[in-house]
Image (cartoon, grey):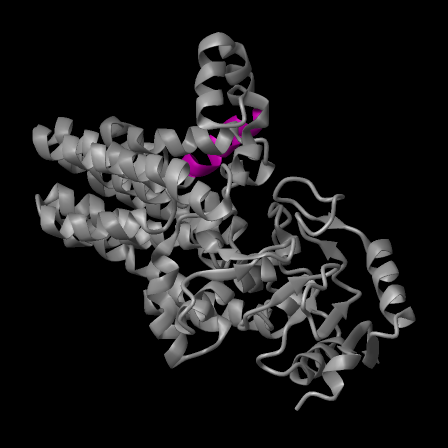
Amino acid sequence: MAAWTWVLFAIVRTHHLEFRTQKFDLGNMVQAVWSTAQGRPLEITNASGEQLSRLSSHVDPVLALLAPAWVLAPTPLTLAFLQIAACALGALPVFWLGRRHLESEALAAMLALAYLAYPWLAWVALDTMHPVTLAIPFLLFSVWALDTDRLGLFAVFALLTLSTGELMGVTVAGLGIWYALARGRRRAGLVVCAAGLAWTFTSLYVIVPHFSGGESVFYGAYETIGGSPRGVVRTAMTDPGTILGELLTRDTLAYVVELALPLAGLFLLAPGLAAVALPQLLANTLSDLPTTSDPYWHYASALVPILVAATVLGIARLPSRERGVAAAGVLGLSVGLSAILGPWPQLREASRLVPHQEWYGGTPPEEHVDALRDAVALVPPDAPVSSTGKVGAHLSARRYVYSVPVLGRADWVVVDERDPVIPPGATRGGTFRRGVLDPARIRRFLAELDASPVWNRVQHRSGVSVYRRVSAESEP
């Protein structure tokens, strides 16, 4: 676990120091955690320049629990490390489940290693930073606690799971149903189910509307099938063909195969637990966004732990003489596919099957990185700033941090012409949850600043420009 953590952290650290991480989403989480440490719980600046609570978009108060870690080590890499280390800890409940059901520490260790080798786990852990990713270990600990009838411990991990996102209540509810049916603890299971559903309902219909002043913006990801939970139910009842049309696609089939193949599909031998993943699988595949049904992204966070835990229980249902072969097969498949599809730098050049080679983006020229570092050093720690996305990941630990071309209260502007992404919400040209690559808009923005008497350019080197508001120059 330690080796896996440090290898992945080394990759993230390199990317961050080379300005290849993003304000969306690492910088957003940094600002939420920093604000909490400053006494303004989960306050962020959204893409349009408004100051609001993180709870206006996602109900993931687990971020507030990271504030003490930020105080001890105030750097975005702290959040990246915690996410990776948390995912690594998921190997413990996998091992404990295996030891309990397979009655073999050797086989349990093989499955714990298979969990760490599961290629999508590494990609999700590297996708810094998303609170839902923390649900991976929390859900694995939750399954183990239920499996051993430790309801008090389960309550702790279930609460932590719920705190990672509004939809996690549905997965927790599914665990309650599984516990009621598989373990015969119907009353406890129904209580868990009701609590999970209550969390998701309260999050979507009370918390988000309270902090945003309207319904969740993420309903926009389901416009094709109704645009809201009620709309989806209405479409399912009146036009089920539309739902089936979204599900029965080549992309959906590929997504399922990609998730199942490293585990040899053995989770199907424990259908009760595997079924807990179905609601999140439907949420991912019914979305209009292609990234939600792509295992390289954090949207698989609620699927990975359930499928892995179900694989352990599924292997336990095989005859004793076949369990070793099955565990070895899962480990071999996970390791082999990880070598081909994983994010390992030493292997990526040899692999032509990885569709996310752009995650590396190529090492930027040293002079460009130096210019970005100098630009970040010019901006005072507490100054309101507007920036392009990748440099924004280094400037988000402040109260006001805007995304170019939004200026808001900014006294400083940092623009990297090699990063011409306009985030959604910062321009009408963006689509839901997806920005636009618009070098022309960046050039116009720079021309406007150059022509404005309000702004002075204090650096222009290697495509990196830094501006300071004239009125701010006289301030101490």
Please state the horizontal and vertical placement of residue 468, each as a whole percent of the image. 76, 79
In this view, the residue in front, 124 or 257, is: 124
Pinpoint residue 122: horizontal percent, then vertical percent.
Answer: 45, 55
Number of numbered discs overlaid on the protein picture: 0
The one of 71 and 303 positioned closer to us in this rendering: 71
Rendered location of residue 391, percent (x, y) = 66, 69
Q: The N terminus lies in which quarter of the figure?
A: bottom left
Asked if the stretch drawn in magenta spans residue 283, the answer is no
- Spot the residue most to the bottom: 476
Q: Which residue corresponds to the image point at 58% horizontal and 79% vertical from the top-left?
A: 382
Examine the rendered structure and indicate whether residue 476 appears above or below residue 279. below
Question: Seen in the image, is 422 located left or right of residue 332?
Answer: right
Left or right for 364, reference 21: right
Quadrant where the C terminus is found in the figure: bottom right
Nearer the observer, 358 or 242: 242
Q: Magenta segment, which residues?
A: 250-261
Residue 344 seen in the figure: no
Q: Residue at the location (10% across, 28% down)?
A: 186
Can residue 168 be seen by looking at this rendering? yes
